[in-house]
Amino acid sequence: IGRQERIRKSLKRLSSLESTRCFNYNPNSSNVEESSLEHSEVIDIFSKLLVEKKSFRKILVNKFPILFLDEAQDTYEKIIDALVQTQIEFHSQFVIGLFGDNMQRIFTNNKKDLSKFIPENWKRPEKIENWRCPKRVVTLINKVRFDADKFQQESKVNHNGFARCLIVDTNKPNLDKLLVEDEICKIMGEITNDDKWNIRSEIKTLILEHHMAATRSGFHKFYKPLYDSALRSKLSAADTQSLRFLVGTFCEFIKSVQSKNDFNIIKILRNSSDIFLDFSTVEDQLSYLKNIRDKKNELFDLLMDSNNSIKIILNYIYQTNLLNIPSLLVQALVLDNYAVDTDSSSSELIAYSQALDAKIDQLFKYASYIDGTSAFDTHQGVKGLQFERVMAILDDDEAGGFLFNYDKFLGIKSLSDSDKNNEAQGDDNALSRTRRLFYVICSRAEKSLAVVCYTKNSELLKGKLIEKEWFDESEIHLI
């Protein structure tokens, strides 16, 4: 069903290209028209035009003779290639400034050896001043970084700050990680004499995988079906039309109804619904508006019952035409009415149907998580951000990933033959990726940093950390 629907939509979209004169793009929108462009499509189109069309390159150079590109180390490779070639061609007219830190490269679609790729005549200024991290944290990240590229920074912050490593023995029976992390907050509060360590909203807890945050933040039932499907890579930024609708238009509408914000309700209906599309032709406009008001009031009553699922609320909105809902979500709503053949049905469709069975508050918690207002975030998601108090969770067993491995990086697990070969050949590997990620999370702390390591080898890990001179014995706490 899902595959047939995607084919139908793609064919319809292709057939409309000849008559489309204008495309709509908004990275935070859930546009559903054939003329809407996804973010990845904009990247592809821009790169292709820049490489193949000299007139397009001239337009760029004339309009933006000086172009600054932030987070260059994580910019799409095709974008870097196209821009550098344009600069070479128009070297006397076009200046590019690439800003970034190769040690903070965390994505896989970027230019691996950016410093080697750019022309030799480009200037390479270095910024050694660190105005974010206190001296103790800068000492730690300099140690972490040294074996990678020898680059060292100087803290310009006028206080020493705190960095502690808290090692949790996972051999203990019935280990409750949430209780352990609450206890660690109390320990950090005593060490730093900072009462805000006892307020979870004042601490940014960094976890390796999003599903770890879903469990801790209470949106696991909504998140797990999507995480277990092909949508996993899209979840960190709600990077699908359906997810953008749910965390954007849908959440805003529900909150407006709950707070009885009629002004915002009308605004959303005008922008994201067809309910007012032909309003000028309606004969009895007063009755029409009263009907909309009654639908809104019925929705309010539904929302008063906290046990109602996202699916029940969304289905009511669909039946009453209050909002334009992406077609995949519409299919997910009706999927329960048919026998599900997992071989022929889209895994995404099934995942959405299961996720919508979660309660509405789980969607709000997920939305809070991805927009950065939650107390939790991922190691990868905080690059460029800063927080006064940081708790970094290192837990390979719970993360269950393969791209990063803290046990190998910290020296308490042997390297595989593949790891050794990649290291010998200078290729990216689990160690180099994990080193960069660890550098990123430690360098977020403005005042104090707690590195929490879950391991079965507490004493071995403690010895390795002292051997590396990352922490001294008084800064390591065994739990």
Image (cartoon, grey):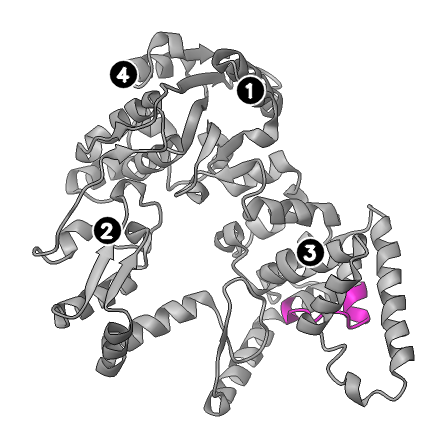
Instruction: Judge from the rendering whether residue 408 lies leftward or rightward of residue 89; answer left or right.
Output: right
Instruction: Judge from the rendering whether residue 307 lies leftward or rightward of residue 384; answer left or right.
Output: right
State which quarter of the image contains the N terminus. Answer: bottom right
Residue 348 at x, y = what percent?
59, 60
Residue positioned 57% across, 35% down in the render: 375
Residue positioned 65% across, 43% down in the render: 219
Tell me the kind of residue under disc 3.
Answer: Cys
Magenta stretch contains residue 320: yes
Whole-Å distance between the Cαs marked 3 and 2? 38 Å
Q: Nearer the viewer, mark 4 or mark 1?
A: 1
Q: Nearer the viewer, mark 3 or mark 2?
A: 3
Tell me the kind of residue under disc 4.
Answer: Glu
Secondary structure under tag 2 reads loop
| Tag shown at residue 469 | 4
Whole-Å distance between the Cαs marked 3 and 1? 32 Å
Quadrant in which residue 58 is drawn = bottom left
Residue range highlighted in magenta: 316-328
Secondary structure under tag 3 reads helix
Q: Are marks 1 and 2 in contact (CB under 8 Å)?
A: no
| Tag shown at residue 112 | 2
Tell me the kind of residue under disc 2.
Answer: Lys
Residue 358 at x, y = what percent?
72, 49
Looking at the image, is mark 1 or mark 2 earlier in the sequence?
Answer: 2
Tell me the kind of residue under disc 1.
Answer: Cys
Quadrant in which residue 461 is drawn = top left
